[in-house]
Image (cartoon, helix red, strand yellow):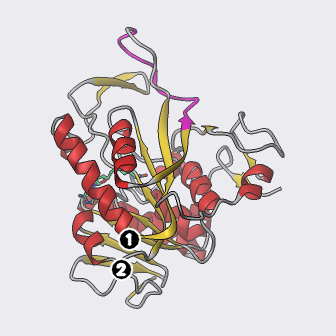
Amino acid sequence: MPTTTTHLPVLPKTNFRETCIGRNARLLNADAFEVLKEIREESVDLIFADPPYNLSNDGFTCQAGRAVSVNKGKWDKSQGVAKDFEFHMAWLEACRRVLKPNGTIWVSGTYHSIYACGFAMQLLGYHILNDICWFKPNASPNLSCRFFTASHETLIWARKSKAGKHLFNYEAMRQGTFRGDFLKKAGKQMRSVWAILTPAKAEKTFGKHPTQKSLALLDRVVRASSDESSIVLDPFMGGGTTGVAAVALGRRFIGIERERTFFELAEKRILAAASPSKGSLFANELSARHMHEEE
Ligand SMILES: C[S@@+](CC[C@H](N)C(=O)[O-])C[C@H]1O[C@@H](n2cnc3c(N)ncnc32)[C@H](O)[C@@H]1O
């Protein structure tokens, strides 16, 4: 149900290739820097950003028992430590401009990028609230056997500034049941290590993105730090996981992705999540092993 009118006036009409899904989601096939300039200052409640990891260095990893290249694509090549840092400073600054004073941002990455992002965030005046360890119990083994098997990613959660008052759905996190997360004890506070499997097959029904996040991860992020009045933005949308979670939870969403193929994948997934007739596809994505339920 793509439409032309939206409830997202924080981004005036643009000339970018754009799809509106229902009235609450706008997806832009464009460069994040160009789109962020057009978004109204201090208008977004929550940002989830999964920027390039800069880890595509021609190495090898193991997938389904086979050695495969770690390269994700040209967009993920490192330009060297200093240039990569400049890039992180630039997008984090552009995001900070559009974030509301009480808004928060999540940034995810591996050691290749997350320290640079964290340092840039501190320099820019963000106030760090947590660093979350996303532990992947089913991470691929290490082929070289010369160091530890990488089995987590880090997410930094920060508010725009120290002075802000951020939204945290404490009770939903404490009381919720997070199926498959054996580290979460029923009725106990949510801790900063989350055990969530890598994306299930059903999450790849429309195709896959090489660094696709698990829907259960984004479901938890969006539930924890937004409500139904929130506008959620993802400047590096990839296969659209943030949009799927946001739309399914009744939030408004703006997603930006430069690569056409990934944009089209995101379009399909978010459309399915937003469309009642395709509701079962969304249920499939949040498959039983990942499902979140309120008690
Ligand atoms: C790590 S991936 C995001 C994966 C996503 N979280 C998911 O679950 O599918 C980063 C994405 O950012 C996109 N990207 C890189 N630079 C960009 C830019 N300047 N503007 C918009 N998108 C960009 C890449 O094409 C890639 O799809």
Counting residues from the start of the chain, the first of labels 2 and 1 encountered is: 2
Predominant SS of the magenta segment: loop
- Asked where in the image residue 29 lies, by quadrant, the reply is bottom left
- Asked where in the image residue 142 lies, by quadrant, the reply is top left
Q: Is residue 221 above or below residue 113?
A: below
Answer yes or no: disc 2 within 8 Å of ligand 1: no
Residue 119 visible to an observer of this rendering: yes
- The verdict on residue 144 being magenta is yes
Give the residue furthest to the bottom.
5
- The verdict on residue 30 being magenta is no
Task: Kindly identify the residue that appears in the image at 41 percent across and 91 percent down.
Answer: 5
Amino acid type of the residue tagged 1 in the rendering? Val
Looking at this view, is 230 or 61 the one in front? Answer: 230
Q: Which mark is residue 98?
A: 1
Give the residue furthest to the top.
146
Q: Position of residue 134 (x, y in %)?
A: 55, 38
Magenta residue span: 133-145
Amino acid type of the residue tagged 2 in the rendering? Arg
Q: CA distance from mark 2 to mark 1?
A: 6 Å
On the rendered structure, is 85 left or right of 114? left
Task: Kindly identify the residue that appears in the image at 47 percent across and 36 percent down.
Answer: 153
On the rendered structure, is 70 left or right of 106? left
